[in-house]
Image: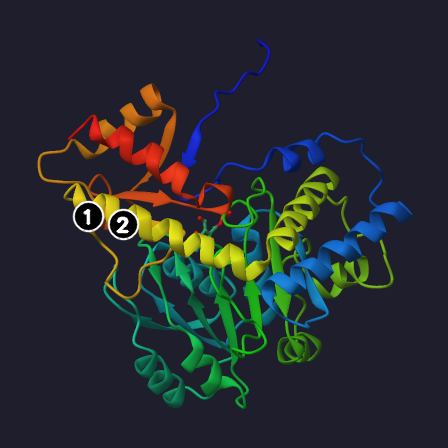
Amino acid sequence: MDELKPPQRLLLGPGPCNVPYRVLRAMSTPLVGHLDPLFMQMMDEVCAALRDTFQTGNQMTFPVSGTGSAGMEACFVNLLEPGDTAVVCINGVFGTRMADVAERCGAKVIRVEAEWGGPLDQQLIIDTLKQHPEAKLCAIVYAETSTGVLQPIQEIGAYLKDKDTLFLVDAVTALGGVDLQVDAWGIDACYSGTQKCLAVPPGLAPVSFGPKAMEVLKTRQSKVQSWYLDLTMLMKYWGSERLYHHTAPISMIYALREGLRVIQEEGLQNRIERHAAAAGHLRDGLADMGFGFWAAEGYRLPPLTSVFPPEGWDVEGIRKQLLADYDIELGGGLGPVAGKIWRIGLMGENACVQKVAVLLRALQDFA
Ligand SMILES: Cc1ncc(COP(=O)(O)O)c(C=O)c1O
């Protein structure tokens, strides 16, 4: 094999996004052991900074070893037991994946669906929950990366606050890029991924579990079916006992720690506003060029814009050319819109006017 020399791509797809150099540098610093006192201190720092980012006081907030899907599985396998009912809201690929994972846990899944590209009606979800008070949880994707829809969720959280049903939220493309208030919005369990708005490589899934979720975990009748993702055991490593469970991915924790330091320095609110401003510039520029938007007006997700290129554009051909000739990566469509849309991510340090200008300039060559 030759020496590894990847090109410097501008990663404007659905994630991963480009990572600040200081995060990459943190990954190349010397390893310590996963039970080293220095590493333990780092674990505490990372958990505290994640709490700030999730806007929660939940003690059980830590990064699961694995990508966003591991965070998803960690939530479902720990909170569901065979025979439980789960209300799963679906308006895109990741809602569909949640339903699949819930069924694999042996749950009876009640689907609430909306057309892809639009939001789910919160009242319809609440009405479904009223019909199913036995539901163990209600799961929803807050930022649907497959469609670019930012789903309103606060009314559901408020409804479930004094109910037994847990509120489980996918915040993979939200954490660090759009407002997300785990405690104030009544979210009982939430998961994310590092490669989106946290601007850290893929490999960790920050999760947060509130008191209601922890109670459900304590009163389970059966063992969690996944050994690796069993929170009762993971708690013993990430909590005060520091008991070995698995070998933590040290370099990824270094990276996450540095990525969270970047967020602290910028300020979470400033970062969220920067993502919104960059998305506004992108939408204006694309609208001027004749692009159409898939996500419904008023529900567009700042970190991910889904667009229909103008009539006559070779959607997939141009996307390939952007990568090959311009080193710009965009995402393609998934499911029913495969080959029809582009998904343009402005996440982390890429959420800025300069990167938008680079993309718009490149696109002019195809107009
Ligand atoms: C909303 C959402 N949920 C879950 C996932 C799964 O995350 P991963 O691909 O990191 O496993 C993704 C990935 O893009 C996502 O966008």
Q: Are marks 2 and 1 in contact (CB under 8 Å)?
A: yes
Residue at screen point 85% across, 64% down: 240
Residue type marked 1: Ala
Viewer-proximal residue among 342 and 291: 291
Q: Does 204 appear above or below 77?
A: above
Q: Disc 1 marks which residue?
A: 287
Which x, y percent locates residue 294?
A: 22, 54
Q: Residue furthest left?
A: 312
Report the side of 172 relative to 31 (left or right).
Answer: left
Picture quarter with the C terminus: top left
Residue type marked 2: Arg
The answer to whether mark 1 is within 8 Å of ligand 1 is no
- Kindly tell me whether residue 188 is visible in this rendering: yes
Give the structural element (helix, strand or loop) at label 1. Answer: helix
Picture quarter with the N terminus: top right
Q: How many marks?
A: 2
Which x, y percent locates residue 347?
A: 46, 46
Q: Disc 2 marks which residue?
A: 283
